Amino acid sequence: MAATQRIAVGAMAAAACAASLAGCATGSDGTKQGASGPQKGAPAPNSVLRLIGDGSTAYTGAQPYLPSPERLKPGQKPPQFVVFSWDGAGEDSQRLFSHFRKVAKENHATMTYFLSGVYMLPEGKRDLYKPPQHAPGRSDIGFNDEQGITDTLRQVRLAWLEGNEIGTHFNGHFCGPDGGVGTWSVEEWKSEIAQAKDFVKSWKTNTGMERAAPLPFDYDKELIGARTPCLEGQKNFMTAARQLGFRYDSSGVDNQIWPKRSQGLWDLSMQLVPFPGHTYEQLTMDYNFMVNQSGTKTQGDPDKFDYWGDQMRDGLLKGFYRAYDGNRAPLIIGNHFESWNGGTYMRAVEDVVKETCNKPEVRCVSFHQLADWLDAQDPQTLMRLRSLKVGETPRQGWASFLSGRPAPAPKGVPGAPAGRP
């Protein structure tokens, strides 16, 4: 089981460049029932620009297309949330980051991109990275060149302007017993997190690309969650993350039940779903499907590519419908921008996005949006939802199951009565 759970895993010039991005932040008006997407009346991107630090990042106002969470009304059936997330997000010659941005927009979806900090660090500056338990300049996923950094920066800018979330996948992606993240202390995790943030906040200094447009967000505020490499080191990472103000973690393995808080963070772990043709269930991640199909060979038997992709697609869809027609637990899916086994897993994920995100009462959202929604709910309602087993529908129906009078909504949450403290 352990093997199947591993994850490969100048001011004026800047203002002009940033303003030029505004026309790129296009999207749907979110008119499909239950769909989550760009909303009418969203603020214009880059209507405000305040450079931060060396100008690598900037405050540009509230994130466009980030919906305000609403508390469920008594008896209201919860929406079906689906989260598509990407480990080590970056743009390379495969152009998968830009492709899935397009797929998301076309299907009323937003996603979470876990950016690897070393993708913002040029090879020539590798010694700036001081990984815990390793020599300076060491990384199991390498570093980047100027073109790769430029391309990744463009995708990160546009993704955020379209309402997507930029999380972190940290830096060197060290796994296993020899200095892997599973052996790191809380303080070592804090060092890794600080460096991951710093590489995003200081890419202009590190690359010399001073005239390039800044990233349009304050990363100290934007970064609220992560997924650890290979799903290792979760316990000490969560302790560090809680102390640093993170709001969620997605480094675990769970069943398809409603999330709860763990160590002060929302546990938004990936889940086990049916694995067609097998009696056991499979984690909702491309790497894990690959390992159980072609082993650690990233390019197996070409004659099986279509079958393997269909197997992943059908497994994810079985998990989706089990929740959609059952307990409505959010479905958490994780992937990598990789063309393993001929790109069959990328095809599978795209098929799942297209089939699920346009359905009534379905919201394809980022972890940020899901955490916002969970925060807005009555704790008693969440307790009732967590009482439902995998695929279980309330026997008495949703209206009766969630008809109890909720506790008063916290002040400032949409749906709170006027004047309620």
Image (spheres, rainbow, N blue to C red):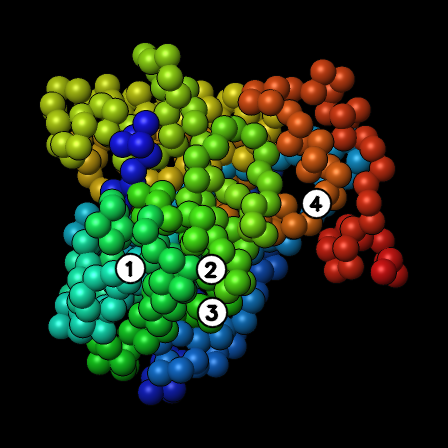
Q: Is residue 286 above or below residue 397?
A: below
Labels 3 & 1 near each other (Cβ < 8 A) = no
Mark 1, Cα crowd under 10 Å, few <14 / some 14-19 / many 20+, is many
Q: Which residue is mark 3?
A: 220
Considering the numbered disc 3 on the image, is that residue within a helix, a strand or a loop? helix
Mark 3, Cα crowd under 10 Å, few <14 / some 14-19 / many 20+, is few
Q: Which numbered tag is attached to residue 288?
A: none
- Closer mark to the observer between disc 1 and disc 2: 2
Q: Nearer the viewer, residue 176 or 12?
A: 176
Mark 4, Cα crowd under 10 Å, few <14 / some 14-19 / many 20+, is many
Gap in angstroms between the C-alphas marked 2 and 3: 15 Å
Gap in angstroms between the C-alphas marked 3 and 1: 17 Å
Q: Which image quadrant for residue 56?
A: bottom left
Q: Which numbered tag is attached to residue 171?
A: 1
Considering the numbered disc 2 on the image, is that residue within a helix, a strand or a loop? helix
Q: Nearer the viewer, residue 267 or 149?
A: 267
Which quadrant: the N terminus? top left
Identify residue type, mark 4: Gln
- Closer mark to the observer between disc 2 and disc 4: 2
Labels 2 & 4 near each other (Cβ < 8 A) = no
Q: Position of residue 305 (x, y in %)?
A: 19, 24
Q: Which residue is mark 2?
A: 240
Q: Which image quadrant for residue 299?
A: top left
Does 420 sit left or right of 166 as displayed?
Answer: right
Q: Which residue is mark 4?
A: 377
Identify residue type, mark 3: Asp
The residue positioned 72% from the left and 43% from the top of the image is 379
Q: Is residue 315 above or below residue 339?
A: above
- Closer mark to the observer between disc 4 and disc 1: 1
Q: Which image quadrant for residue 125?
A: bottom left
